[in-house]
Every structure is written in C-alpha cells, then in structure tokens.
Image (cartoon, helix red, strand yellow):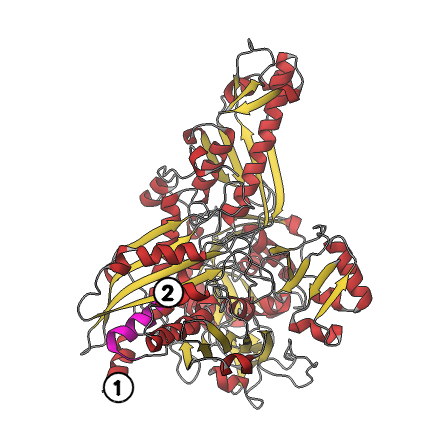
Amino acid sequence: MAEAVDLKVVGSRPVRPDGADKVTGRAQYGADINLPNMIYGRVLRSTVAHARIKSIDTSAALKIPGVLAVVTGADFPQAESGEIGGEGGGDVADVAQNVMARNKVLYHGHAVAAVAAKSQSIAEAALAAIKVEYEKLPLVLDILEAMKPDAPLLNPNCFTKGLSEKQTKPSNIASVMTLARGNLDEGFAAADIIHESEHVIPMAHQGYIEPHACTATINEAGQATVWLCTQGHFDTRAQTAKILGCSVADLRFIATEIGGGFGGKTVVYLEPVAILLARKSGRPVKMIMTREEVFRATGPTSGSIARIKVGVKKDGKITAAKCWIAMEAGAFAGAPCGPAAMAIFAPYTIENFKVEAFDVLNNKPKVAAYRAPGAPQSMHCMEVALNEVAHKLGMDPIDLRMVNAASEGTQAPYGPKFPVIGFKECLEAAKKHPNWTKPVPAGAGRGFAVGFWFNVGMQSSAEVHINDDGTVRVVEGSPDIGGSRASMCIMAAETLGVPYERVRALVGDTESTGFCNVTGGSRTTFATGMAVVRACEDVIAQCKNRAASTWGVDADQVEWKDGKVVPKPGVNADLKPLSLAEIAAKSARTGGPISGRASLNAQGAGASFACNIVDLAVDKETGKVDVLSFTAIQDAGRAIHPAYVEGQYQGGAAQGIGWALNEEYIFNKDGVMENAGFLDYRMPVASDLPMIDTQIIEVPNPSHPYGVRGVGETGIVAPLAACSNAMRNAVGFLIPDLPLSPPRVLAAIEANG
Amino acid sequence: MAHVHFPDNCLPYTQGVRQVQLAVTNYRELLIALEEKYPGIYEKLERASVAIDGQIYQDAFLEPFAPASEIYFLPRIEGG
C-alpha cells in the first residue's frame, strides 16, 4: 500500500464530474425516462392496517377508457419462501408479498393492486374504481404489545428463531440475537457506579429527496428493460427475477442518477409491478411514487426500545454492561437486530456483557436498511449511559471512552479481534479539537458521543479500457450516490500514473458490465475501488508486455513508472520510455485493444469509528432546539476525494440530527401515519443547521490498495446520543427518549419543574 | 487446527457446544467438517459471515487458515 506522501492524485479534490448535469437538469433521474407510447402505472394501497383480502373486483377499472392493464397479487407467481440474496438477505416470499399483497394486508399503505393507463389522471380514476373487500383484523403497533404472547398475530407461520429450543407457538417475535461474555453478576458487583435507563427511539425514514421511480418495457420475447433509481441494479434485478419467477438473463436493469437512497433503495417496490403492467398492456410503463407513498409504503428504519445497564469503577473502567433492545420490523421480519447487538459495545473493551436484541413484527411498513442499520438505535443508549456515568464520576466523557477504548487486538463483542482501527486516534483528535476546548456558549449544552460501523466488502467488477489516444475509460456497476465515479477516476489515475483529467468513469447497466453488489454498506470506494485498481494493474501488465515485445526484451525486464513503461536498470538504457498513449496508439499491431478487468469479492473491509461534538441551545419556553455547532470526526482510512468524504460526514450528521431532534412516524390508533409528508415529517433543511465541521482521520486499512475504509454510514450513528447528551447538559436532566422535538422537550422541562 | 466459536443461533445444532477445534486448512473444509459433525448446520451457516483471525468475510469459500486460526460466525451485515 502506498504511503500518503507518494500519492499524486489520491487525496486531491477535483471538481465533481456530475455536478453540471445535476444543477442544470440534464441529469436523468428515475422519473426522467420517457419512451414512445409510454403509459403510467399507479398502485392501489390498503386503507386498513391489518385485514384479510376477501375479494378484489377490478372490472370497473378495466372498463374505463384509457386503462390498459390491471394487476393484483393473483398475477404474481406463488410467493415461495427462499433466500432473496444480496447484502443482507431475507425471504423472497416476504419481499414478494410486500411488493403486492396476496391474502392479507399487513399495514396501511400495503400495495393491493396496480393499474396502467394512458395518463396519470386516468390511472387515478382506475384506482378509485377498484373495489377491495377487507375483513378487518385486530392490529398491533406498539413494540412491547406486539411481543406479548396474546398479541394479534401478523404471520401464523412465524416462530421465533435464535432461541435455544425450537419454538412451536407462532409469535410476532421473529428472532432473537444474543451476545454474551464473562459473568454479568460479578461484573456489576465489582462496579463502583451503576447506571440504568430505558430509551425509546422512533421509527424514522431515510428521507431521500427522490421518490422511487422506474420505467419498464418488455418485448415479445419476454425480455424486459427497466430504468430505475436504485442503489444496486444488479441486486434489484436479481430480486425482481425471483419475485416474477423469470430468468435474470431476461431482465436488463439500467441505473439512472439517484437522488439519495441511504439503504432505502436497496430493495424492490415498483419494478416487478411495472414489468407485469408492461407485459399485460404491451406498452412501456412509468411508475413514480408520491411522497406520501414513500412514507407509507417504503421501508423506514426500526423504532426501538432499549434498556441499558452499565457498571464502572471510579477510574472509569467499565466492569459490566447489559442491553435489552426490541426493534420493530414492521410487517415482515428483518429489523437489524444482528448489527445492533454487535455494534453497541464495539468501541469498548468490556469483559462482562450481554446483549439481547429482538426482531418484532407489527402493523407498520416493512423496514429497510438506513445508514448503519441498527447501530444508531443500540449505540444511543450506551453512549447516553456513559455520559451519565461521566457526570457521576466527574470525568471528562472523552477520557472515559479513552479508558475503555478498543484498539488493534481487542476482542470485539461479536468475537474476532480487531485488526488495526482508528478509534483512539478519533478520540485524541476530539479532545484537542477547538470545538471541544472552546467554552460552551452561555445557556447551551455540549454533548459528545461515539459511532461505529463495520463496513462490508462484497462483490464488484470493473473494466478499464484504454482509448487509442491514451485516455482511460472505467466501466463499473456501482450507482453513484456519493461521488464514486470521481473516486474511481482518482484511483485509476493514481494506479496508472496518468492525470485525473484523462480518466472517465461510467456506471454500466446489467448487460454492459460485470456484477456489482449494491452501493451501500459503505462498500463502494472500498470494493469497487479495489476492482478498478486490479483492472488497472491488469492494464499495466498488458502494457508492459506490449512494450517489451516492441523492444524485443522479456516482460520481466521492464517496469511501470509514472504512467510509462521503462526498461529496468541495467537493461538497454537507449530505450525511450513508452507512455500509455504511445502503447495504445500501436495496440492494433501489438495484440489488439488494451482492456483490463477484475471481478472480486472484496474482503478485509475496515471498520470506521467516529466522534461527534455538538452544542445545543434550548429555548425553555418553547422547547425549540438550535444546533449551534456540530463536529464530525471520523476515520476514513484514506480519503480518496476528501470533499466527498466530508460530504458523507456532513450528510450522516444531518440525518442523525434530524432523527434526534424531530423525526418520527406518528401513527393514529388505526395504524395510519399522520405525518406522511415533508411538512409534518420535519427533516432538517439548510436553515436549521450550522455548517457541520469535519475532521478526517486517516488510519489506513491495510486490506485496500490505498488504505480505504468505508465512510458512508458511521456518520449517522453518534449524532443521536450526542444530541441527547447535549440536551442533558443544557437542561440539567436526562430526557431519555427521542426525538427531542419541541413539544417533548417542553413537556420534559415542565415535568422537571 | 481451527478454533471455531459458535453464535447462540447455532447451539441447537451443536447441542449447546460453543467451541470446537477441527483439523482443517480452509473454510470449505471447515463447513464440510461441521456438517459431518453437526448435521443441518451447513444450511444455517451458508449465508453467515465469518471472521477468520479478525478479518470478516462475506461468502467465504477457500480462505486459508493459519495453524491456529480463530473462527467466529457472525450474522450477515446489511448496510444502508
């Protein structure tokens, strides 16, 4: 791995290549595809939160002029259980039934039918004409209520997994994840101070600004082409193939530009429906969700209830920690209990601990991944607990973390020993940061918290083609959400030794490039970047062969240096170095076009730790909270394009702050979301937040050619607890639950006198 | 010799055994040996992630082991 001082392009900040198209409207997003004879699809959604579907009568809808197709669950193949594949996995039957209900609706907004018509307004009229007869069932929304043995059951075939004995009574508890080590009783007995608290975190949405959208067309041979905004067109193609029971080879998925995903666009909602409507109507079908549909029917992240108990000695050493956390999955199993349980204590060396995490079904939309899924919910309670302990000890909260900080060789709570990590470096940076050392503004409270995410590798492919003028074209299959095209160009330029300006990157569709798993899991710069570097190395090997054959020497007598093939020392010094452009210009003569390729399952993803510092001011008369300053310090391993890395830190912070201070799903007693729009589901906008200060720490990951660690997700983890801790310091007492919205803060202030 | 540590959800297959040592040299051999010893466990582990000497792998196959590798099975990590 190259040292930072040797790098010429990595670490630079070229202007983003996609910026002009995006700000001028030229960029094509999911809703921007228009095809000849295209018609419009819309989804009919359940008006009740839990019911059997007794009948669906579509006859009146089909009679409306301009309506060309209607589909219901009956048009889909039988939803058979099986592995959906992809990053996190899941059951095909669950995803298929979420795309279109079969016998039951499980949440308000669940898709029950879809129409395709010549205009949006005709499609709307057709939806209104479809008659669905429901047999209402009792519903359950509250997590603890759903866990009770006599709770209304969402799935009679759901038996709790993860317990030592096989379960025979169905339950809304889909699974339990338990991690434990040491002896809790002894650990707590050894503590000088014990803190216990319970915390509720609300269900929240990823809040991507671009709704789900796709356009599908299908030919007479049954081969479909779908343009879609997605985090992973290969994975969504595979999911769609399983849901429709067709061959992957008959589906071509083309990723458009994407206006945010954050995990919420790693799953399918519209695509199988659009394909079926296209097949039935014989026309291309465009489908765009409304914002209301996005809220009601696409995965938010789990709300949770967490009970934490921590014991520490007077010197700050944690002697024991215990957490019980229940996370709502919504209508189908899949709350991120595993990562929640694994992450909560990950930053710390703790000899005695136990975590139990429960995946709980309830009559809400099926949850989907949201930036470090599970970690914000679980780590919130631990980071708040440590803040309380720091208060009781009269100890600096950063020093408390330092006493217990994990480092290389520490056994992680989930078993393996950490390889090299940058947690202590982040803590040291936070301790010295001006936003920590400066006085707390009068009347404000300052909070500190820590974040962590594992990051993943998984599969990526890349091709690198050398044009005959020596310019470079990189083709890979990772939808560009956070600037990955520029990062791929930077890594290609660095590896090949050519200027950044001579490299272009293209995101290929599923027919034109090799398989890539989703742009998610903080994997793209790491894994697809690794594939790009390997493909460049393949190019270099070919160039060396071409040059060697041109010179009449053996290939092992030449080397690659600064974008050129040069003879090794001691070989004929009269040989003039050959540049990439010169070799490419003669490629027809020396063996044909020069293209490198790599397909890999990238292993060795390095974890990323973060520290957050936030100053909050609280208006004690209204409960309104102002963020005076926010600092995100995080280990990137190596920042390929620092501005993009800073952007990830800031974006994660903004989302975490929004979740901490205001975002929540508000359901009425009938399971209807009452704030299904940006006016009432209030996310931070530019005027709500100060500039988020960032500091990039670089503790290189030895598994990546340039030391990259994923950065996209860790940034959302710490803000929740950092805000809770700042609030506690501002008002003088702990408000345990989120969000810290004005009515809740005001009520807490009034309750505490 | 691989030192294998089982998570709680594998204990029904291992009859409560939390650790086992097996003379295997790579991950593929390990899965074969585990299925032989604990029938049915392969299906449970097929989609699991695995940490081999601290390095986490998804979809491991032929990853080699050191003479005394520490092996931990983990849930698959889904990111966002």
Main SS, magenta residues: helix
Choose between A261 and A626: the one closer to the eye: A626
What is the chain letter for disc 1? A
Stretch of the chain drawn in magenta: A722-733
Badge 1: residue crowd in 10 Å (few <14, some 14–19, many ≥20): few
Name the residue tied to disc 1.
A752
> Is residue A511 shown above or below A688?
above
Badge 2: residue crowd in 10 Å (few <14, some 14–19, many ≥20): some
* Residue A202, magenta (yes or no): no
Residue at the spot 25% in from the left edge and 58% down from the top edge: A690
> Is residue A430 shown above or below A355?
above
Residue at the spot 39% in from the left edge and 58% down from the top edge: A427
Residue at the spot 29% in from the left edge and 68% down from the top edge: A679
Name the residue tied to disc 2.
A399
Marks 1 and 2 belong to one chain: yes
Q: Amino acid at mark 2?
A: Asp
* Quadrant hosting residue A450: bottom left
The percent coordinates of residue A275 (x first, y second) are 57, 56
The percent coordinates of residue A291 (x first, y second) are 38, 64
